[in-house]
Structure formats: structure tokens, C-alpha cells
Amino acid sequence: MAYDKFNILRSSAVPLSIENVDTDQIIPARFLKATERVGFGDDLFRDWRYNPDNSPKAEFILNNPLYSGKILVGGKNFGSGSSREHAAWAIYDYGFRCVVSSFFADIFKGNCLNIGVLPVQISPDFADKIFRAIETDPKTELEVNLPNQTITLLSTGEHESFDISSYKKSNMMNGFDDIDYLVNIKPEIQEFASNLPI
Amino acid sequence: MSNTLFDKVWDSHVVRKIEGGPDVLFIDRHMVHEVTSPVAFLGLKNRGLKVLYPERTFATADHNTPTINQHLPVADPLSANQLKALESNSKEHGISYWGLGHQKNGIVHVVGPEYGITQPGATIVCGDSHTSTHGAFGAIAFGIGTSEVEMVLTTQCIMQPKPMKMRININGKLGKGVTPKDVALYIISKLSTSGATGYFVEYAGEVFENMSMEGRMTVCNLSIEMGARGGMIAPDETTINYVKDREFSPKGEAWDKALAYYKTLKTDVDAVFDKEYTFDGSTIEPMITYGTNPGMGMGISNAIPKVEEVEGGVASFAKSLNYMGFREGEAMMGKKVDYVFIGSCTNGRIEDFRAFASIVKGRKKADHVTAWLVPGSHIVEKQIRDEGLLDILKEAGFTLRQPGCSACLAMNDDKIPAGKYAVSTSNRNFEGRQGPGSRTMLASPLVAAAAAVTGFVTDPRTLIQ
């Protein structure tokens, strides 16, 4: 599915400093019954965001009007657990284009890259600085520069570079996905399959 | 050059290496279920693409299915619609479909091995993180997202960077009442839920060599809970005896050829791993979790750690204990249990029901406990009857439900109510995993059985004759 091209993103950010945020929290399984990819943002962090009677939990960060933006800053080991791509869809559908953390779970990170959400892994120290800066001033802006592979805390100018493979970087900047690539090399795949030993 | 088991299987499936990017990896077997596939099939439709190798693709319904009255129409319209979508997508693309009511229906990671779809040395994927289960056969098996499901459907490949390699060695003899589930929970408690992220694990040593295939599947199943993509165990006689003569296993000459290949599937003596751990199996106790991730586990006779003993965030630890209604330094033993769940792709196999029955035999279910016993497949269900286990379970006051993922993930009707405590043989104790507000203690089938008959967290070793 096509997604928005990613180049330079400048935005305030929503801080969620909890560690080990698993994909069951990002979107609980009972909201995975759809057969189309629509509306998952409404159920992002459902059980942290809403009471059982569907009233918003005032203390949860997404319900705090002070915080907004296209960047979600998560705690260490963000996205662990279930492989459900719905977690990345919910984040995208809610309006985030980038997730920042000092450590990502593997499958979640791959899912994000496949649907146009940029996972930016930074040092624990820099993550702490970003959390503190947003706590002090919720309007604090970050700049995520994909071409240069840097993330900058604009209030202080502090920045770090982040890793991404040149292949995935090019995909994100052009809005391409892996299927476009694989479909183009189908004859090579079929040739490979016909020569498998078993 | 010396290679690991993982290198041998991965490298032989690389179609193309991309400079500064991932490998294009050929997938031998693709398992599909109702939850993570509909958007992938929709993607194919929108792009006008077909399934490239339907014969390498197998579909079953498990996550979103009821575990009672499976002969009746599914009541929830959203669930019914998702199940219908899998059926029509499978039919349209010529994929084997084992839906509700089909004799082969069951949990994807239970039926795959039972029918011989899982083979040593194969690459296996499914849109489910517990696909790591199939690594028990010396396969490279891991969970993928829906975008990747679409890729595999239409090109039989995914694009992934090759993970780093880790080996976990456990030697020594396991003590009384210590099961493969305890071994896995022990490893995760040592490594944490992110300790193996970025790695593919090989389990080695006499503890795994002495395990049944069911036990190896339980261990490999839980690899993802320490962050690993997957885990694998080199195939041996135990593996070959299990695989031989299954419906989709190679036959005749093809079997001889396959057997020769299976025998090459081991790590060379001087092969090097990026990381290696060694543990002593004789020190492992029956385990139980006290928190809200699978790394928060401990020997059942221990106390919940104190904040100062915990690595990582104090706030996250406190949040977790608060959710569970537990306090630091408390014993787990003696805590009241409301629900017991045995089943799932982790512990829904015959050996798990044998273990459960061995404890409840001659005892009675505690009155205040609700117990859900859910076989992973119809084959497991039949074995339970044929081996006389059902009589033992009934005598003790238990009933058996029908195959499915059930209470593992709170997607179907089987949900643990808010605030209630469940001892569960499944794989995740995340907040709300088994139902909004539910509180999960992960444990082995023996610990689950001990809780079911006493109504409290109990050391199963005190109940083993």
C-alpha cells in the first residue's frame, strides 16, 4: 500500500516514557477483526487511553491537549510482542510519521519501515534529554532529517545520527515498498525455486 | 568455512543480496491465518496480483474462533466476516484451507508440524510472532507483518537483513517438576524481553537433546519473548522420527534425499556465534511470572524482586506490579487463582495435557477456579480421548473445549474478566492480553494443574507422587 514520502519532518512530539510498550498495548487483539486497513488510529493505545465505558482517561498522554505532533517518543524496547502490523497502522492512522526510541523490537521496526513510519533509534542519553525537554516545554520541536539521517532537538541544537539501510532509506524517501521490488525480480525468484535441492 | 546451522539454512535460501540493504529470502512454506491475512489479500487484489505458489501456502483459522459449539454459526459478525474472508481468499487463490469444522483445523503452529508441513532446513513464515515454534525442527521460522504476508503470497520471498547469531547452551539434568516451559521462562528471565533482539538463537546442550519434539516446540515458541526473531534446534533422531510419514512429509526417494539433507543440518564444531550464553539446567525451578512481560519470571519458591534488584526503569516496574496488584518482596506461592488456562501454541500439545492430567488425577478442581482446557488441534483432542486422559480430567471436574487460540489473546469469546488472576500456560502476560484488566501469571502445565486443584499458586513438586 502506498504511503506518504518521507523527507524532513519538523514537529512537536508526544512523549510516552514507559519501557517495553508491547503491541498488545498499542492495539489490543479485539480490535484486529477488520478485513480492511481503515480506522485503526481510533483504537491506538485503546486500554490506556479509554476507560471501559469509553470515556477518555485524562491522565494518558494522548488525552492531554498540551502534547501533540507527528512524532511519538517511546521508552526502551518499544513495540515488543505480537507481530501485528495493525500496531504500526494504528500509529500511522493516528497521524504519527515517526517513532523515536532508544531500542525497538525487531518485527515492529520492520513493520514500520514497510508502511512508511520511520523508526529512529537514538542513545538512551539523548532519549532522556528529549523526554526532559518535552516535559519542560510541550511545544519543543524535533527535526528528523532522513536524507542526512539526523535527529535534532531544535531548542538546543543537540543532534544525533541514526541508522537505516540505504535501500530502506531510498524506499521511504520515494514511498516505495518491498513488493514493488520483489514483483520486478519474479523471474529470478522462479528460477531459484526450480533449482532448490529439496 | 565453518557455519552455524542458522547460516546453512539462511544462506541456501538467499535469492539475491542487496548492496546496503536486506537479503531476498526464499520461503519454503507459508502459513496463513484469518487475522493478519485479509489486508494482504486485499493488497494483491488492488495490485492485480496472484499467489505465486499456492502449493506452498496453507491456511487455517485459529485466533478468532470460538472453542465451544463450533458447529454453530460464529455469533460475532466481525469475527464471522473475517473467517469468511479467509475462506473466500483461500478458494480464490487455490490455497489449502482448514477452517472451522475441518478435521485439520487448529492452531497454526500445532497443526503445521502435525501434518508434516514443518520440515527441517526449511524457511517458514506466518503473520504471527510465534512462528518461531517451527524452529524446533531445525527450520528457520519466524513471524512477519501483513506487508510481508502480501510479499510472500505473491513472490514467495521476503526482504530481511540477516540477523546476528546467538547460541544458548543448557547442560545438566532438569529437576523434578521442571518442564520445557520452565526452561524457556528461565532463559527469558535471565536475558529480559529484549536480550535477544536482533539475533536468531540456536538452543544446544543435553537439556534440549533430551527433550521431546513437543518440548522443543515450547522452547522455540517462546524465543520471540526475549526479542529473538526465532530459535532453532538441530534436527536429530527425535526430529526425524517425528517428521517421518506425516501427510506432507517427503515420501520414497524424496524422503531419502531429504534425510541426507537433514543430516547436514548442524552447526560446525568451530563455527562462531555473535553471542553465547551457558546455563546449568539443574538449577532451574518450576517458574512463574509476577509482572506484565514474560521476562518478569522467577522460581516459584522465590519472592518477587525488590525495586533495587531490578535492572531498568523503576517506574515501569512499579506500574507493572501495581497492575498485577502485587508488592515487591512478596512470595508468589499461596496467591489466590481465579482462572486456569491450558492451551495455546505454547502448551496446547499432548504432552502438556499428559502433564496436567498427571497432577489432577485423583484430585478435584478447586470450586472457585474456572478452568479452560483447550487442545491445540483435533489430533491433540483425539489423543486426549484415546489415552484415557479425558476420563481423568472429567473425574477431577474438568471439561475439554474445542481447538483454537482461545484465552491466549482475548480476541475470541474466551476472555479473563477484569481484575481476575489467571495461571496460564500461554506466552504473554502483557496488560490486558487475556482480556481488558486481566492479570496473567505464566507457568507450565504442571504449575497450572497445581493451581487448578488447590485454587492457589502452588509448587507442583509437592503434588507429584
Image: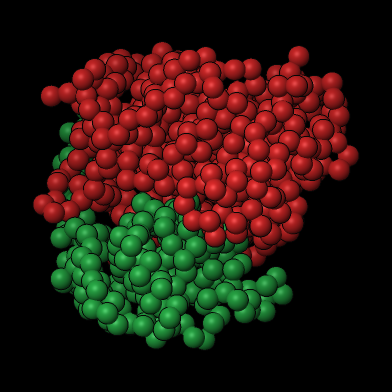
Position of A157 relative to A181 (above/below): below
Number of numbered discs overlaid on the protein picture? 0
Q: Is residue A9 left or right of residue B218?
A: left
The residue lying at 36 percent from left, 83 percent from top is A140
Lateral position of residue A179 relative to residue B330, left or right: left
User: The C terminus of chain B lies in which quarter of the figure?
Assistant: top right
Q: Quadrant of the N terminus of chain B?
A: top left
**In the depicted view, which residue is nearer to us: B328 or B5?**
B328
User: Could you say where residue B376 lies in the image, as x and y percent from the top left?
Assistant: 60, 36
Which residue is depicted at the point 70% across and 43% down? B330
Most foreground residue, B60 or B177: B177
Task: Pick whichever, A36 or A67, lies toward us.
Answer: A67
Left-right relation of B60 to B148: right
Q: Is residue B286 above or below residue B229?
A: above
Residue B246 visible within the image: no
Find the residue positioned furthest to the left.
B19
**Residue B48 locus on image (x, y percent):** 30, 65
Q: Is residue B23 visible?
A: yes
> Could you tell me which residue is drawn at 26 percent across and 49 percent down?
B160
Residue B238 % position (x, y): 45, 16
Chain in red?
B
Asked which quadrant contains residue B131, the reply is: top left
In the image, residue B141 lies at what x, y percent?
A: 37, 38
Q: Colour of chain A?
A: green
Residue at figure coordinates x 66%, y 38% from the top left? B303
Name which quarter of the figure residue B368 lies in: top right
